Image (tube, grey):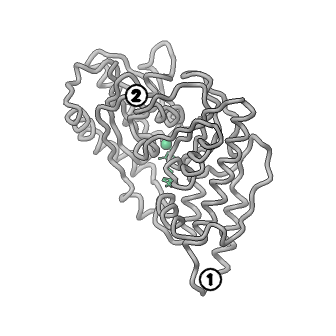
């Protein structure tokens, strides 16, 4: 089954063609990062307009890379939420239009479920497994019992990890989105240079606001002096990755589950991946999406449309939603 998928929930205009939920035939991502960098974050109205301008060329490029004609596609899919409403509307309306023109079904997809499905791309992973989902908007541990059966086992009570990465990066004067740059600098620093606090919360909760405040104080203490940016980044990264992996492992053990995966933009983080893969030596089986499928992309939407679509009577009546 060939699915043409669109992702436009935030600042990436992306399309992909995916076969049977696992094989990526083409994957095109147009990032708006340069546009939003000068504002220090995503401006929803600007993002929606850019999606409108780039969606046509991205669709064309995706068919051309796969060398597949639209009449060979079995279904057209798009993310319908959660995300920025104006942005989601562009992708969803494009996918619905393609489905009407080519007389094929439209499939709506939940963005968070799509991040989880990134793990099925080019891989043999099968449920059940525990997934640590870490993105710019969410931090959750999900028990995936079956392809379309998920239970949220833990979530953040304040900021999402990606959000904290971006805010801490900004404290150190790094450009938006700071996560990737902070990760790079952290690899050159001493992870034990600064002792940073770990939130005392329930086993099914994450909290990062205390860590964020500690980082604010730490950076302020260097005012007028040279800031040891690499050591601060490394110490922050060590605290975050240690907390995320410890909690996920604890939950996997509670569910008696030996397969652990991660997903979302922060799943591209070098230290988090290292700590996750190190669990293989303790008898766990671990998976992480390829780097290009961690941050927002449409291949994961194509996989999700196959494995875990939004079920409804008439998908053409689906509306976009901002939170979920
Ligand atoms: O999943 P994603 O592309 O968008 C959302 O659905 O939110 O995640 C974006 C987030 C941003 O906060 C970005 O800074 C973070 O993922 N990120 C990283 C890395 N690469 C992207 N955070 C830490 N280390 C990275 N290597
Ligand atoms: Zn995302």
Percent position (x, y) of residue 196?
A: 71, 65
Quadrant (top left/top right/bottom left/bottom right) for the C terminus: top right
At 58% across and 35% down in the image, what residue appears? 285
Residue appearing at x 36%, y 52% in the figure: 32
In screen coordinates, is 31 left or right of 115? left
Residue 252's image quarter? top right
Give the spatial CA distance, label 1 vs label 2: 50 Å
- Left or right: 156, with 79 as reference point: right
Q: Residues within 10 Å of mark 2 (few under 14, many from 20)?
A: many
Circle nearer the N terminus (1, 2): 2
Q: Is residue 64 above or below residue 157?
A: above
The tag on residue 170 is none
Q: Is residue 174 above or below residue 293?
A: below
Could you say where residue 127 lies in the image, as x and y percent from the top left?
57, 25
At horizontal 47% and vertical 58% (from top left) the residue drawn is 180
Callout 1: SS: loop
Label count reads 2
> Which one is in front, 231 or 310?
231
Q: Secondary structure at mark 2?
A: loop
* Relative depth, front residue between 95 and 214: 214
Dot 1 crowding, Cα within 10 Å, few <14, some 14–19, many 20+: few
Q: Which mark is residue 223?
A: 1
Q: Quadrant of residue 2?
A: top left
Q: Is mark 1 within 8 Å of ligand 1?
A: no
Q: Identify the residue at the far top of this view.
A: 313
**Residue at horizontal 59%, vertical 66%?**
234
Please give the residue where the numbered disc 2 appears in the rendered image.
Answer: 22
């Amino acid at each position: 089954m060939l699915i043409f998928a669109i992702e436009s929930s935030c600042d990436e205009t992306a399309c992909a063609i995916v076969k049977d939920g696992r094989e990526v035939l083409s994957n095109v991502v147009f990032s708006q990062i340069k546009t939003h960098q000068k504002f220090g974050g995503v401006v929803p109205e600007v993002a929606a307009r850019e999606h409108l301008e780039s969606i046509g060329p991205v669709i064309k490029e995706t068919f051309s890379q796969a060398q597949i004609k639209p009449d060979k596609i079995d279904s057209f899919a798009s993310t319908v939420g959660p995300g920025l409403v104006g942005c989601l509307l562009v992708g969803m309306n494009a996918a619905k239009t393609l489905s009407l023109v080519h007389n094929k079904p439209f499939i709506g997809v939940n963005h968070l479920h799509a991040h989880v499905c990134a793990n099925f791309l080019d891989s043999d992973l099968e449920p059940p497994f525990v997934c640590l989902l870490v993105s710019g908007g969410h931090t959750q541990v999900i028990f995936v019992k079956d392809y379309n059966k998920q239970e949220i086992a833990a979530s953040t009570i304040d900021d999402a990890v990606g959000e904290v990465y971006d805010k801490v990066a900004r404290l150190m004067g790094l450009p938006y989105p700071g996560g990737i740059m902070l990760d790079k600098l952290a690899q050159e620093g001493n992870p034990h240079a600064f002792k940073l606090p770990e939130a005392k919360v329930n086993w099914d909760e994450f909290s990062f606001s205390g860590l964020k405040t500690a980082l604010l104080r730490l950076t302020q203490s260097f005012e007028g002096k040279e800031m040891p940016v690499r050591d601060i980044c490394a110490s922050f990264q060590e605290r975050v990755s240690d907390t995320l992996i410890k909690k996920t492992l604890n939950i996997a053990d509670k569910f008696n589950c030996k397969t652990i995966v991660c997903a979302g933009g922060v799943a591209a983080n070098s230290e988090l991946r290292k700590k996750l893969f190190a669990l293989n030596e303790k008898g766990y089986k671990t998976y992480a999406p390829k780097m290009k499928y961690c941050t927002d992309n449409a291949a994961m939407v194509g996989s999700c449309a196959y494995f875990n679509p939004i079920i409804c009577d008439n998908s053409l009546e689906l509306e976009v939603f901002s939170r979920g």
